């Protein structure tokens, strides 16, 4: 991951001085700067004034770097976090340390005048903040101004920042982590000085090569992960860019999309593309049909721009944490644009399945569906990440394990009689087809059932259209029994007593045999009122044929039979409407 971040940093930076590599973006929401003004020689405090930094070009000129929460920032800029007193104290510590380092007349004057005018400065800053009324979308930062220019551009400030960078990486908690005349781990060049404390994220052992964790012997960091200052700057820039522009949210988890290419011009073209599209307005309809979330546009662009030539690769890093203290949950090491292109093409193909269309509105394949199936608690995180890794990374999953996950959630929804149950039933079959088409699972091939004496039977047509799922007589029996159950649930005057026979919505061959007899008895009772026996005659005849094909052998697993039965319950209305439409001579595919 560090190599990819450094590559990204090289594509991002336009500066020619190393210290600028370590500048942090102050944040797009920090648009109001409050200048604390001093004379050119630093001998006089001249009051405060407010200045807007709405323009991005103006904002990126700010020399800003955040320091430790209990220390101070190593630049003459400080973000406002709620209390003026806290900001004042951080900047006071900075000026004190700066004067001790620089010893220039101006830096010493600044420190002295700052403390001499402490009460007046704090009072004016409080007044300015009250006038602005900061909000999450309108953040405030304070900065020191000398004469007509911000102090961050002066030699004292720049020299101090350069020294701070070296010291920050040269030791960790007082322990030296520096080595001379050593190969850099990122650029593989021998450098006069390399550092062992350059990781901008706490996510790996400093004393154990290759491990991803945190802490341990800081003195061993330079042996395990030696990095020169230039590469450390690229690494810092790459992480800052990924955190602000390529940081997304999927299924309750944060993750980074980190592009990588041996050709810097390709990364630069991708960055240009991201910058151009970041301000676009997304229509609700577009988001509704997305595979993922806000990152979906970027993934599609990568798929269709680079999908025919895999000059670019993507790493997906899921993590938990805040700011730069975080723990990696999972990494998808190598996502190819050709894989992304195939995923999106299969997504569109599967969404054209006729049974998905309800009220002329097709449903969509999304990662939200997988998150829903994996549940939303923490125990579902690993399972969800397994699916994501398979979809984007091309890893195989067990058909039985996928089926188990689907059926578990589906049974929950049907037992609760939730409003999501029929939606999930349709999408369960969609998910199986999608995963099969992108070669994540393998659906068994099923044979075509002969129509024989049935001149037109939409149940048989549906089974043959989806033979890969209805690959055995047992699953066909389960599906048709589910359709018969649906006739009782949705055609009879009193369905609730019969619903109790469905129990926990777990179905095997014995339960299906029992339910068929119960359903036919109920239908016979309803027939005097609605003529239901005639309506279900061909369904029951087809069910007889499928029962005979089983030859009392049921190799199917319970989950297969359960999903097939629930699909019959859910899709019976869809098939019944097609039957009515054909009898009228119409076409009802979209209803």
Image (spheres, rainbow, N blue to C red):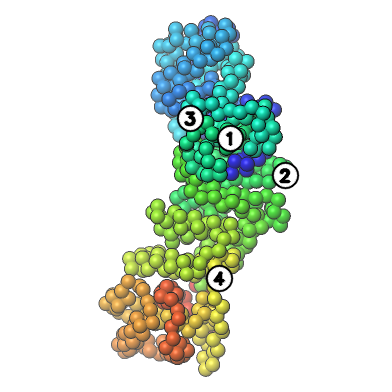
Residue at which label 4 appears: 442
Are discs 2 and 3 less than 8 Å apart at CB? no
Disc 1 secondary structure class:
helix
Q: Position of residue 536 (x, y in %)?
A: 41, 87
Which residue lies at the image location 64% right of the left edge and 54% below the top edge?
A: 336
**Mark 4 vs 1, N-terminal side:** 1
**Mark 2 vs 3, N-terminal side:** 3
Residue at which label 1 appears: 223
Which residue lies at the image location 62% right of the left edge and 43% below the top edge?
A: 4
Are discs 2 and 1 less than 8 Å apart at CB? no
* The label number, if any, that marks residue 263 in the structure image: 2
Q: Residues within 10 Å of mark 1 (few under 14, many from 20)?
A: many
Disc 3 secondary structure class:
strand
**Mark 2 vs 1, N-terminal side:** 1
Marks 2 and 3 sit apart, C-alpha to C-alpha, by 37 Å
Q: Residues within 10 Å of mark 2 (few under 14, many from 20)?
A: few
Q: Residues within 10 Å of mark 4 (few under 14, many from 20)?
A: some
Marks 2 and 4 sit apart, C-alpha to C-alpha, by 37 Å
Marks 3 and 1 sit apart, C-alpha to C-alpha, by 41 Å
Which residue lies at the image location 54% right of the left edge and 47% below the top edge?
A: 317
The image quadrant that residue 502 belongs to is bottom left
Marks 4 and 1 sit apart, C-alpha to C-alpha, by 46 Å
Residue at which label 3 appears: 139
The image quadrant that residue 147 belongs to is top right
Q: Nearer the viewer, mark 3 or mark 1?
A: 1
Disc 4 secondary structure class:
loop
Q: Is residue 83 visible?
A: yes
Q: Judge whether 494 appears above or below 46 on screen.
A: below
Are discs 3 and 1 less than 8 Å apart at CB? no
Report the side of 193 relative to 560 (left or right). right
Which residue lies at the image location 46% right of the left edge and 16% below the top edge?
A: 92
């Amino acid at each position: 991951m560090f190599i990819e971040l450094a590559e990204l940093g090289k594509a991002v930076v336009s500066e020619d001085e190393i210290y600028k590599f370590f500048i942090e973006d102050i944040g797009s929401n920090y648009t109001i700067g409050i200048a604390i003004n001093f004379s050119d020689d630093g001998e006089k405090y001249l009051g405060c004034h407010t200045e807007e930094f709405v323009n991005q070009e103006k904002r990126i000129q700010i020399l800003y770097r955040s320091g430790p929460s209990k220390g101070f920032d190593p630049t003459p800029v400080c973000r406002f976090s709620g209390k003026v007193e806290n900001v004042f104290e951080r900047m006071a510590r900075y000026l004190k340390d700066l004067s001790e380092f620089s010893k220039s007349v101006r830096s010493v004057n600044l420190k002295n005048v700052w403390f001499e005018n402490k009460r007046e400065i704090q009072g004016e800053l409080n007044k300015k903040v009250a006038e602005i009324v900061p909000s999450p979308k309108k953040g405030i930062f304070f900065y020191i101004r000398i004469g007509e220019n911000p102090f961050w551009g002066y030699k004292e400030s720049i020299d101090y920042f350069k020294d701070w960078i070296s010291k920050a990486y040269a030791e960790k908690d007082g322990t030296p982590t520096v080595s001379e005349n050593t190969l850099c781990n990122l650029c593989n060049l021998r450098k006069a000085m390399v550092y062992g404390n350059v990781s901008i994220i706490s996510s790996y052992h400093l004393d154990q090569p290759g491990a991803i964790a945190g802490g341990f012997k800081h003195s061993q960091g330079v042996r395990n992960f030696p990095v020169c200052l230039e590469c450390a700057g690229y690494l810092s820039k790459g992480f800052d860019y990924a955190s602000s522009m390529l940081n997304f949210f999927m299924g309750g988890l944060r993750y980074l999309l980190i592009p990588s290419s041996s050709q810097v011009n390709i990364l630069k073209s991708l960055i240009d593309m991201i910058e151009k599209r970041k301000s676009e307005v997304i229509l609700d309809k577009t988001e509704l049909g997305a595979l993922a979330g806000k990152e979906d546009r970027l993934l599609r662009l990568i798929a269709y721009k680079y999908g025919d030539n895999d000059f670019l690769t993507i790493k997906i890093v899921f993590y938990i944490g805040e700011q730069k203290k975080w723990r990696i949950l999972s990494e998808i090491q190598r996502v190819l644009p050709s894989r992304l292109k195939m995923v999106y093409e299969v997504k569109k193909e599967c969404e054209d399945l006729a049974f998905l269309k309800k009220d002329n509105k097709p449903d969509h394949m999304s990662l939200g569906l997988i998150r829903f199936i994996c549940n939303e608690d923490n125990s579902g995180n690993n399972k969800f990440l397994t699916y994501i890794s398979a979809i984007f990374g091309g890893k195989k999953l067990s058909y039985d394990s996928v089926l188990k996950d689907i059926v578990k959630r589906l049974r929950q929804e049907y037992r609760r009689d939730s409003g999501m149950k029929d939606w999930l039933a349709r999408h369960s079959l969609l998910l199986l087809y999608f995963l099969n088409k992108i070669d994540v699972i393998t659906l068994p091939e099923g044979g075509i059932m002969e129509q024989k004496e049935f001149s037109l039977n939409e149940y048989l047509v549906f089974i043959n259209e989806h033979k890969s799922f209805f690959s055995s007589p047992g699953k066909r029996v389960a599906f048709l029994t589910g359709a018969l159950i649906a006739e009782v649930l949705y055609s009879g005057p009193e369905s609730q007593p019969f619903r109790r026979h469905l129990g926990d919505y777990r179905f095997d061959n014995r339960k299906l045999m029992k339910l068929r007899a119960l359903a036919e008895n109920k239908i016979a009772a309803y027939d005097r009122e609605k003529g239901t026996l005639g309506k279900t005659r061909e369904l029951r005849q087809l069910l007889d044929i499928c029962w005979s094909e089983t030859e009392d052998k049921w190799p199917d697993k319970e989950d297969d039979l359960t999903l097939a039965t629930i699909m019959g319950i859910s899709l019976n209305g869809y098939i019944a409407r097609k039957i009515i439409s054909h009898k009228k001579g119409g076409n009802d595919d979209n209803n």
